[in-house]
Image (cartoon, rainbow, N blue to C red):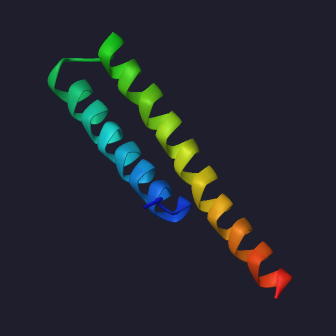
Amino acid sequence: MRRSPLFSGVIYLLLGVLFTYFAVQNVQNDEGWGFFTYMLIFLATLDFGSGLRMIMLHFKIKKQIKDKK
């Protein structure tokens, strides 16, 4: 069974929030910004971007299906 773009988008957004939370905790606990913190922020950025793209794709597909009817 295939996953819908909406479901994948929500999962990506949740991962982005999780990575952002871990980055904030890492800055607070480790006295500043290190390589691991920058890596977490980079991953969160990619996940937010992918999540938004998937959600927009879902609505685009939904609109195309509606226009065909």
In the displayed structure, 5 sits above or below 45; it is below
Direction right: furthest residue: 68
Relative depth, front residue between 16 and 69: 69
Query: Which residue is painted at 33% across and 37% down in the image?
Result: 19
Residue 22 rendering spot, x and y as whole percentages = 25, 35
Query: In terms of image quadrants, where is residue 43?
Result: top left
Vertical order, 36 against 25 (above or below): above
Decide if residue 31 is on the left or right side of residue 38: left
Instruction: Report the residue that reaches farthest toward the top.
Output: 35
Along the line of sight, the residue nearer the viewer: 15 or 40: 15
Q: Residue furthest left?
A: 29
Percent of width and height locating residue 9: 50, 56
Image quadrant in which the N terminus is located? bottom left
69 to the left or right of 36: right
Q: Quadrant of the C terminus?
A: bottom right
Q: Which picture quadrant has residue 41?
A: top left
Work out whether residue 10 can be spotted.
yes
- Towards the viewer: 37 or 48: 48
